[in-house]
Image (tube, rainbow, N blue to C red):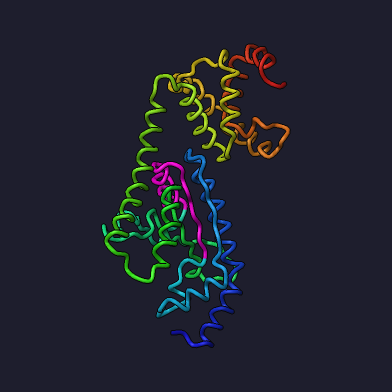
Amino acid sequence: MLADTELEDLRTRYVAAVPGYQQIVDHVVKQLASAVGHRGVNLVTIDGRVKDTSSFVKKLMRKDYASPWAEMRDKAGVRVTTVYAADVAIVDVAIANEFEVLYREDKREQLAPDHFDYIGLHFEIAVPIGDGLSKDDRVCEVQVRTETETAWANASHDLLYKAPVEPGPEIKRGLHRLLALVELFDLEVTRTREAIMSHTTYKEGRLLLGLEQAFLDLVAHRSDPELSRHVIDALRPVIPSLDWDEYRRLLDPFITDNRPKLVRIYADYLADDRNPLISQPESLLVFERIEHDRFRLAERWAQVLPA
């Protein structure tokens, strides 16, 4: 147990370090959002927090640390929540490429059959910024989970950490059912998504997904999928092919030839609300059609969309 003076010294040290840890969190969130977006992953929640001082002190009180400051590694924390289980692997690669990984653990692989802890990926990464912090202190914890795994983490924390005794057999069976449902839900979402995207009548969906991935590679920005579907449906007569594999034979060379110009356009106008379509993936289709079939595009546009 820490003496009162030790606890107060650690608290004072932590208060002084908080601004540095906030810099770390802001840096990791921004860099990770860009890296994940450029890899074509949309609809991801990335949020961060610096452990508040009260939580810091309380954790010191309940943990038997030999070296309290060095052993508490979650002072800065970032959580990445994906919609699809397949995207967890993409985020995993992004973290490995963008940061110096000090520690990585796949909680699902490590979880014993009779345990019910968090599931997902857990990292500790070294971060090159953080005013007032030593190199050893510039560490950020990163958790990567699906939305379903996050729901399980929240429920299991409330159910198990507050339990005064070891759960009995009936409670354990219930927990096993809940954990199985988490895995089953993510598996069924993946299976259903693949079935929908491979269906012969879902050409527009595959086209939109392809445009999203190409757009995110350039700009890493969230878009409005309902507007995308509306614009693609309105411009259907002037789109050379709704089959993504066919259309990308036109789009890929166009992006390659014009990449620097496209990057500049998005950088200059993305935040300009007078140009709402600039922040949409179908803007790539519009740019490509302007170059290759501008007169038919203009005629169709005047019939179905605001000038």
Residue 298: x %, y % from top left: 67, 15
Relative to the observer, which residue lies in front, 119 or 5?
119
Q: Which residues are magenta?
A: 76-98
Residue 251: x %, y % from top left: 51, 23
Relative to the observer, which residue lies in front, 281 or 59?
59
Residue 80: x %, y % from top left: 48, 51
Q: What residue do we see at 53% from left, 71% from top?
A: 55
Q: What residue do we see at 59% from left, 18% from top?
A: 235
Residue 37: x %, y % from top left: 51, 42
Q: Is residue 73 above or below residue 27?
A: below
Determine the image quadrant of residue 290.
top right
Q: What residue do we see at 48% from left, 73% from top?
A: 59
Apparent side of residue 159 relative to residue 20 in the rendered image (left or right)? left
Q: Please tell me whether residue 85 belongs to the stretch shown in magenta.
A: yes
Q: Quadrant of the N terminus?
A: bottom left
Q: Is residue 203 above or below residue 139?
A: above
Q: Quadrant of the C terminus?
A: top right
Q: What residue do we see at 59% from left, 79% from top?
A: 12
Apparent side of residue 68 relative to residue 16 in the rendered image (left or right)? left
Q: Please tell me whether residue 89 belongs to the stretch shown in magenta.
A: yes
| Residue at the farthest front position | 170
Apparent side of residue 239 relative to residue 89 in the rendered image (left or right)? right
Determine the image quadrant of residue 284.
top right
